């Protein structure tokens, strides 16, 4: 979409923005947060723009495929936006995009960080950053980690539908790696509910003795969990100040990476 500013258009000199473009994006933002189509009056009311201005913007966006008009006249997001989103996802390397957040995480916590995804019946780490201090723990890159006893795996399970969680757990052995490993489905389901509520998952020596980690969710533009960002190290205990700090920093960095992927919590 090309919007020229000349006659009838103005440039916001203080902010360097084309006003009509900014207003058009406002309409897209409003519709992206709505669970249904919105009428012209509703768009005008929510944006604060006059009905005539809203109509002109919506008509232009519709003509370019960025909006579509429903049978009842309401406006909804158009398929052109899906095409743009697909082009964006093809155009970036998640390892490259996540690198600054991994490095920042390791720098702020003093331990290693790793990013993982759900692959089949396990959590697979595909990139990491190493801290320059403390004992080094090299993440198992490319290795399928168990879901029931790692912070990455439990986090991913927590954001899946309950039916799929039960199906995954029934197909794999809930092996007891240490005396802290949760090996009962009902107990794990209770833990997963807590993880979903808190927004992060903790591993407290459940996979390897003495090893503790925290994982936070990385969401895509559609609000789906795509990756787990993890801080991992030989913390003394999960209630220690350094681990509490690691939880906060991991959640913050995961949130920023989610925003970089187009996620909005609004």
Image (cartoon, helix red, strand yellow):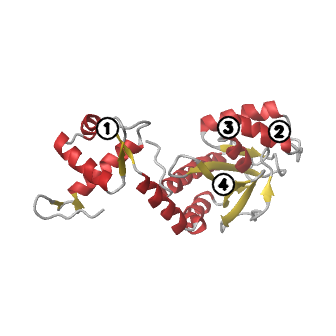
- Tell me how far mark 4 sits from mark 3, CA to CA: 22 Å
Q: Secondary structure at mark 1?
A: loop
Query: With respect to residue 191, does 108 lie above or below?
Result: below
* Left-right relation of 254 to 54: right
Q: Residues within 10 Å of mark 3 (few under 14, many from 20)?
A: few
Q: Residues within 10 Å of mark 2 (few under 14, many from 20)?
A: some
Residue 192 coordinates in the image, percent (x, y): 70, 36
- Tell me how far mark 2 sits from mark 4, CA to CA: 20 Å
Q: Residues within 10 Å of mark 1 (few under 14, many from 20)?
A: few
Residue, disc 1: 73
- Tell me how far mark 4 sits from mark 1, CA to CA: 46 Å
Task: Give the tally of numbered discs.
Answer: 4
> Along the polypeptide, which appears first: circle 4 or circle 3?
3
Tag shown at residue 161: 3
> Along the polypeptide, which appears first: circle 3 or circle 1?
1
Instruction: Kindly tell me whether residue 9 is visible in this rendering.
Output: yes
* Left-right relation of 257 to 124: left
* Left-right relation of 114 to 252: right
63 or 122, nearer to the observer: 63
Give the residue at x 35% y 49%: 67
Residue, disc 2: 182
Q: Secondary structure at mark 4?
A: strand
Give the residue at x 10% y 62%: 7
Give the residue at x 67% y 33%: 193
Give the quarter of the figure containing the N terminus: bottom left
42 or 264, nearer to the observer: 42
Give the residue at x 67% y 65%: 127
- Tell me how far mark 3 sits from mark 1, CA to CA: 35 Å
Q: Secondary structure at mark 3?
A: loop
Query: With respect to residue 123, does 181 lie above or below?
Result: above
Image quarter for residue 44?
A: top left
């Amino acid at each position: 979409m090309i919007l020229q500013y000349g006659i009838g258009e103005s440039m916001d000199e203080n902010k360097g923005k084309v006003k009509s473009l900014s207003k058009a994006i406002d309409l897209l933002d409003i519709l992206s947060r709505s669970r249904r189509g919105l009428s012209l009056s509703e768009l005008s009311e929510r944006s604060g723009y006059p009905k005539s201005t809203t109509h002109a913007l919506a008509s232009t966006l519709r003509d370019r495929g960025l909006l579509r008009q429903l049978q009842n006249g309401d406006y909804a997001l158009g398929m052109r936006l899906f095409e743009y989103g697909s082009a964006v996802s093809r155009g970036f390397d998640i390892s490259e995009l996540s690198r600054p957040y991994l490095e920042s995480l390791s720098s702020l916590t003093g331990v290693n960080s790793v990013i993982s995804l759900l692959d089949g019946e396990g959590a697979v780490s595909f990139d990491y950053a190493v801290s320059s201090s403390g004992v080094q723990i090299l993440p198992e890159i490319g290795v399928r980690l168990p879901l029931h006893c790692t912070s990455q795996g439990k986090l991913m399970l927590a954001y899946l539908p309950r039916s799929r969680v039960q199906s995954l757990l029934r197909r794999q052995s809930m092996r007891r790696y240490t005396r802290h490993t949760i090996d009962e489905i009902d107990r794990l389901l209770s833990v997963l509910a807590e993880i979903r509520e808190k927004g992060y998952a903790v591993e407290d020596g459940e996979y390897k003795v003495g090893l503790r980690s925290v994982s936070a969710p990385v969401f895509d533009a559609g609000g789906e969990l795509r990756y787990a960002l993890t801080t991992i190290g030989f913390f003394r205990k999960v209630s220690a100040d350094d681990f509490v700090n690691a939880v906060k920093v991991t959640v913050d960095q995961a949130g920023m990476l989610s925003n970089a992927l187009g996620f909005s919590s609004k």
